[in-house]
Amino acid sequence: DMPSKVIIIKPQIVGQPAPGYAVLRVVVHPSTVEVFAPYEVLAPIDFIPTSPISIEGASKTVIQESSLEIPPGLQVSEFPRPKVVVEIGKK
């Protein structure tokens, strides 16, 4: 019976889109996950990052399934493979 908390999944976007293009929007589904840990481990955690998602040189939307980088001592209720959509368009 450990404390639990629903926290956001934050995508780690790395790299830059192609010249003349920009990131318009980033969507993560699911956007949250329920985690369990002793209070002292759980309290300072505001988000769980995804594995890095590269948009280097991209000139169109990048859609990628990612894993979560779960901090030590934290347990998740399930292990979702969040789908990250990075919308890229002309500046």
Image (spheres, rainbow, N blue to C red):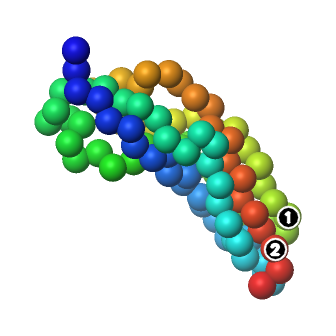
The image shows residue 9 at horizontal and vertical percentages of 49, 45
Q: Which mark is residue 84?
A: none
Position of residue 52 relative to residue 13, above or below, is above
Q: Nearer the viewer, residue 18 or 75?
A: 75
The image shows residue 30 at horizontal and vertical percentages of 59, 40
What kind of residue is marked 2?
Answer: Gly
Q: Which mark is residue 89?
A: 2
Relative placement, left or right, of 82 versus 10 is: right
Position of residue 86 relative to residue 5, above or below, is below
At horizontal 20% and vertical 35% (from top left) the residue drawn is: 41
Q: Mark 1 points at which residue?
A: 60
At horizontal 38% and vertical 38% (from top left) the residue drawn is: 6
- The kind of secondary structure element at disc 2 is strand
Position of residue 23 relative to residue 67, above or below, is below
Which of the 4 quarters of the picture holds residue 80? Answer: top right
At horizontal 43% and vertical 22% (from top left) the residue drawn is: 77
